[in-house]
Image: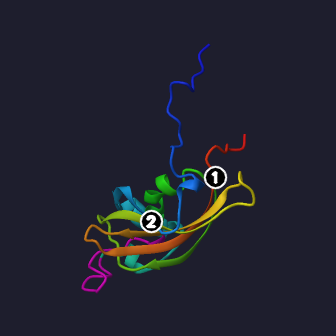
Amino acid sequence: MADHHDDHDALLGHWGWFEDFYPGQKMRHSRAATVGEIEGSGPAKQVMNTAQAHFNDHFLKGSPLGDERLVFGLATASLVYGLASQDTAEHASAELGWSRLRFRAPVHHGDTIEAFTEVVSVTPGDDAAAPGTVVFRHWGRRQDGRIVFEGERSALIRRRGSRLAA
């Protein structure tokens, strides 16, 4: 009987292991995403964020933030992380945390966001086979080039050749 795994591509890629990251490394991630109604307002409702700017079509008319409802900030952060994850999280064994979150410009439904990353630091594990900690600075920008979000993320990244626990 043939091994069904022989004719399939591996889920994880050949890049993104702990050894592949170095401080100062910069990445422009290959995909962008346009924010829709569900991504923009849904998370605000789920966490009971009742700020009118997320729900009321007329609340921001004539304001410096624009005339349309705002996308919930953590939805923007999640979108940026999602766009960066193929390059920075495929071999993560644990997400350790986020810090220094900044929401720098408004995002509205219909805006397109692209993501960028810089490696801040790389700290090896206790032995040569142990995963190491990588600190990433992620940021996202709108279609007009304006940065809308930035934040730092720490992750435990596996070394090349390591296996997931069975």
Q: Is residue 138 left or right of residue 110?
A: right
Tell me the tag on residue 101: none
At x 45% / y 59%, what residue is drawn?
84
Question: Quarter of the image holding residue 108?
Answer: bottom left
Tell me the tag on residue 117: 2
Which contiguous range is marked in magenta? Answer: 58-76
The x, y position of residue 32, in whole percent, is 34, 58
Q: Nearer the viewer, residue 102 or 51?
A: 102
> Secondary structure of the magenta portion, mostly?
loop
Q: Secondary structure at mark 1?
A: loop
- The residue tagged 1 is 158
Residue 101 counted in the magenta span: no
Question: Quarter of the image holding residue 124?
Answer: bottom right
Question: Quarter of the image holding residue 69?
Answer: bottom left
At x 26% / y 82%, what residue is drawn?
61
Residues tagged 2 and 1 counted as in contact (Cβ below 8 A): no
Kind of residue at badge 2:
Thr
